[in-house]
Image: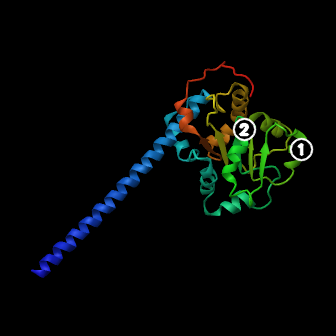
């Protein structure tokens, strides 16, 4: 009788373990599906904003290698980017491998304003003691001063499209090490962002299509759409041709 009870208890425990494993497997599968859905949605959002149409095969191929998931919490942004570089993040992101070209960041953040540049860099505070960061915008900062700054090693850079373009034209800012491009889509108090703010959106798209689109589709550049969910919610609110006063 005791042996029979022990067998039943053992079978019950085994069944419980199997159920728990199945539950964990199902949950993991659901999480993976949610990530895949999010990546596909972000790619669709990006191509719609660009005004291009990618095939389903191109979208599937891109989904596996170009979209980098990130929280909408700026304090987590640096941790998300660090995780994208893996265990060797310090060697790749901060130190570089072999000779590192001056003025060539591994991470570039594009935002709509100087205030947003500074805000997003706060998410990298835990890393900037080891990784040199540069603020690249025009407000209170002269172009020549930034050109001089970029003669040194830079690991992370945050800037506005107009100033980034001028620095690239001056051959001060390089893309030889660039692995992650963070696009700040978080809307401002008026609901405008990098993709919709009249003063910067055209400059941004020209920059993106000329310098970042090809590396993205080749799998050499990962894109982080920071604030994507809020931007998607506001999609269509501002139509092309809208204007707002300078702030």
- Secondary structure of the residue carrying numbered label 2: helix
Viewer-closest of 105 and 114? 114
Residue at position x 61%, y 55% from top? 79
In the picture, the disc for residue 145 is 1
Across and down, in percent, residue 174 comes to 79, 46
Residue at position x 58%, y 39% from top? 227
Residue at position x 85%, y 42% from top? 171
Residue 134 to residue 50: above or below: below
Residue 29 to residue 207: above or below: below
Residue 50 appears in the picture as rendered: yes
Residue bearing the label numbered 2 = 211
Query: Is 104 on the left-hand or right-hand side of 85?
Result: right
* Picture mark count: 2
Name the quadrant containing residue 1: bottom left
Query: Is 89 on the left-hand or right-hand side of 29?
Result: right
Name the quadrant containing residue 18: bottom left
Across and down, in percent, residue 100 comes to 79, 57
């Amino acid at each position: 009788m005791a042996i029979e009870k022990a067998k039943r208890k053992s079978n019950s425990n085994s069944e419980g373990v199997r159920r728990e494993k199945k539950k964990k497997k199902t949950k993991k599968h659901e999480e993976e599906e949610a990530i895949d859905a999010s990546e596909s949605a972000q790619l669709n959002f990006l191509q719609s904003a660009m005004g291009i149409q990618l095939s389903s095969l191109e979208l599937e191929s891109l989904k596996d290698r170009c979209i980098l998931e990130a929280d909408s919490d700026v304090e987590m942004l640096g941790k998300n980017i660090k995780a994208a570089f893996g265990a060797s993040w310090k060697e790749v992101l901060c130190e570089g491998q072999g000779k590192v070209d001056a003025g060539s960041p591994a991470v570039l953040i594009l935002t709509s304003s100087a205030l947003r540049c500074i805000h997003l860099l706060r998410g990298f505070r835990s890393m900037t003691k080891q990784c040199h960061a540069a603020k690249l915008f025009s407000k209170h900062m002269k172009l020549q001063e930034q050109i001089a700054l970029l003669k040194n090693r830079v690991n992370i850079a945050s800037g506005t499209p107009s100033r980034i373009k001028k620095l690239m034209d001056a051959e001060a800012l390089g893309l030889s090490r660039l692995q992650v491009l963070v696009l700040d889509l978080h809307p401002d108090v008026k609901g405008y962002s990098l993709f919709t703010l009249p003063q910067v959106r055209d400059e941004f798209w020209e920059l993106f299509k000329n310098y970042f689109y090809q590396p993205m589709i080749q799998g050499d550049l990962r894109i982080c759409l920071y604030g994507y969910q809020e931007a998607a919610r506001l999609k269509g609110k501002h139509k092309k041709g809208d204007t707002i006063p300078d702030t």
